[in-house]
Image (cartoon, helix red, strand yellow):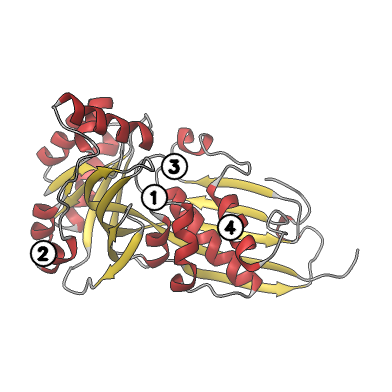
């Protein structure tokens, strides 16, 4: 075998919830202006990149089988799109000469940015492997072209998002203690475009115009006044929640049930259908998650804020036969 160098790089990025999601006017480009307050969660997506090798893309993780089975493993996946975008940016063409392995913890199609975290981790891991800049500031513009949530996955923490939510300004979170959450996963998915379309239709049905200008809040100023979990609960809101509930009415029951179990505040995360519930303490979050699990529901207890992308591992040396699945194609 011809002697060659190989790389193995791993990076992780966090899932997120939108503490506030305020939707503005529908633009001529088909997108809405939006202001979002993002919180990164300690649910991390890890991407391992190994090459040169025959292309492969595989997913595993502690999620319901439906979630993992629904993920495309071809070039339509955001992992591959991120690799292609970085390759074009740095003048390379060999982005498919890699094996990509993804370990998922973020619910799929749940409004929590799992695919965006995969894209951010791919950008960081491949940039590290290729020896190009992998700091969030160096990748943010590229990330924004991949999706509105991808730049935030680079930064993590707490951030204000404007534009389509993709223009990210990190916010100081030192005044906010660790927050405790329970996530309730749905057995059904919701399409983000379908939720936005229903949001627009509901405005029309109420006599409004989706293209009309709407006042959007100054979320950075609102967040500056937050010091406790109760303050945060009072601030939380989601303009898409009514549309998500209209498409999937069981979400209303889930929100009400969470609050009966003792959550400070529960709401649809992003475009849904995951429900995120803020709890007063780790003990309350564990109790609620245990109760839901006992009832046969899929619930996850987690915390935030969390760090953005982290380079977990980077190696460059000579390949051994079978090392990291080299030349064995897709897993």
Instruction: Please report the residue visible at 45 percent of the width from the left and 55 percent of the height from the top.
Output: 117
Residue picked out by circle 2: 228
**Mark whose residue sits in front, 3 or 2:** 2
Residue picked out by circle 3: 63
Depth order, front residue of 24/102: 24
Sort mark 3 into few (<14), some (14-19) or many (20+) by Cα contacts within 10 Å: some
Answer whether labels 4 and 1 touch (C-beta < 8 Å): no
Sort mark 2 into few (<14), some (14-19) or many (20+) by Cα contacts within 10 Å: some
**Viewport quadrant of the C terminus:** top right
| Element assignment for label 2 | loop
Answer whether labels 2 and 1 touch (C-beta < 8 Å): no
| Element assignment for label 1 | loop
Q: Is residue 28 above or below residue 97?
A: above
Residue picked out by circle 1: 113
> Disc 4 versus disc 3: distance between alpha carbons?
28 Å
**Pointer 4 or 3: first along the chain:** 3
**Pointer 4 or 1: first along the chain:** 4
**Viewport quadrant of the N terminus:** bottom right
Whether residue 248 is visible to the viewer of this picture, yes or no, is no
Instruction: Please report the residue visible at 49 percent of the width from the left and 72 percent of the height from the top.
Output: 138
Depth order, front residue of 303/4: 4
Query: Horizontally, is 124 left or right of 282 in the view?
Result: right
**Mark whose residue sits in front, 4 or 3:** 4
Answer whether labels 3 and 2 touch (C-beta < 8 Å): no
| Element assignment for label 3 | loop
């Amino acid at each position: 075998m011809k002697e060659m160098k190989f790389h193995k790089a791993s990076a992780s990025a966090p899932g997120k919830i939108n503490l506030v999601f305020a939707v503005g006017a529908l633009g001529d480009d088909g997108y809405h202006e939006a202001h979002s307050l993002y919180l990164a969660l300690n649910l991390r997506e890890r991407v391992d990149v190994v090459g040169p090798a025959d292309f492969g893309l595989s997913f595993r993780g502690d999620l319901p089988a439906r979630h993992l089975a629904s993920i495309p493993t071809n070039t339509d996946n955001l992992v591959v799109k991120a690799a292609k975008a970085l390759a074009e940016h740095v003048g390379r063409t060999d982005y498919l000469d890699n094996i990509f392995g993804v370990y998922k913890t973020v619910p799929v199609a749940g409004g929590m940015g799992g695919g965006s975290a995969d894209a951010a981790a791919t950008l960081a891991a491949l940039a590290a492997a290729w020896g190009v800049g992998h700091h969030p500031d160096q990748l943010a513009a590229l990330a924004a072209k991949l999706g509105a949530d991808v730049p935030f996955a680079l930064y993590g923490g707490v951030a204000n998002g404007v534009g389509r939510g993709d223009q990210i300004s990190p916010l100081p979170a030192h005044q906010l203690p660790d927050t405790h959450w329970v996530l309730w996963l749905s057995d059904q998915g919701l399409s983000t475009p379908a939720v936005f379309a229903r949001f627009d239709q509901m405005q029309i049905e109420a006599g409004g115009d989706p293209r009309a200008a709407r006042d959007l809040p100054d979320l950075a100023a609102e967040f500056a006044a937050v010091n406790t979990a109760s303050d945060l609960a009072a601030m939380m809101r989601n303009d898409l929640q009514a549309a998500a509930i209209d498409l999937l009415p069981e979400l209303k029951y889930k929100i009400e049930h969470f609050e009966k179990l003792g959550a400070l505040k529960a709401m649809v995360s992003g475009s849904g259908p995951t429900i995120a519930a803020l709890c007063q303490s780790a003990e309350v979050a564990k109790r609620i998650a245990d109760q839901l699990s006992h009832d046969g529901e899929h619930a996850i207890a987690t915390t935030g804020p969390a760090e953005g992308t982290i380079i977990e591992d980077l190696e460059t040396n000579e390949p051994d036969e079978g090392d990291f699945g080299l030349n064995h194609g897709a897993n």
